[in-house]
Amino acid sequence: MVKAKELIGKTIVSEESGRKFGVVGDVNFITESGELMNIVITEPTKQSAELKLSEDEKGRLLIPFSAVKSVGDFIIISEKEIV
């Protein structure tokens, strides 16, 4: 099991293309259940903008946690799960 704070600072990479989308700056979760909802991207790349991701109230890009396929040295996401 990975703790949410361990995700902060990890690079976000596409499973399909290997493209970099940015770095995890924060995570959004439901307080009552602890369910992770979104990864907040800091240092977004040009590829992040191409995905037309949702934004939070501060204008930061969000990746739904359902798109996360694996967590290790990098956060691997499925672009198909986002669009």
Image: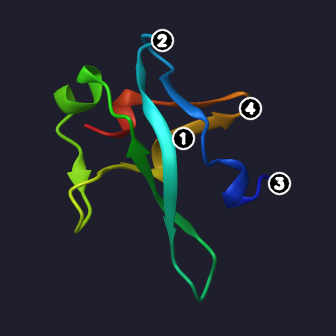
Q: Are marks 1 and 2 in contact (CB under 8 Å)?
A: no
* Residue that numbered label 4 is attached to: 72
Q: Quadrant of residue 82?
A: top left
Image position of 73 (left or right of 36): right
Whole-angstrom CA distance, mark 2 to mark 4, is 15 Å
Residue type highlighted by circle 1: Val
* Residue that numbered label 2 is attached to: 18
Which residue shows up at 59% across the image and 89% down it?
Answer: 32
Q: Position of residue 58 (x, y in %)?
A: 24, 64
* Residue that numbered label 3 is attached to: 1
Tell me the SS state at disc 4.
loop
Whole-angstrom CA distance, mark 1 to mark 2, is 14 Å
User: Which numbered marker is on residue 68?
Assistant: 1
Q: Are marks 2 and 4 in contact (CB under 8 Å)?
A: no
Depth check: give the residue in front, 82 or 57. 57
Q: Earlier in the sequence, mark 3 or mark 2?
A: 3
Tell me the SS state at disc 2.
loop
Neighbourhood count class around disc 4 (C-alpha, 10 Å): few under 14, some 14–19, many 20 upward: few
Depth check: give the residue in front, 80 or 23. 23
Residue type highlighted by circle 3: Met
Residue type highlighted by circle 2: Gly
Q: Earlier in the sequence, mark 1 or mark 3?
A: 3
Q: Which image quadrant: the C terminus? A: top left
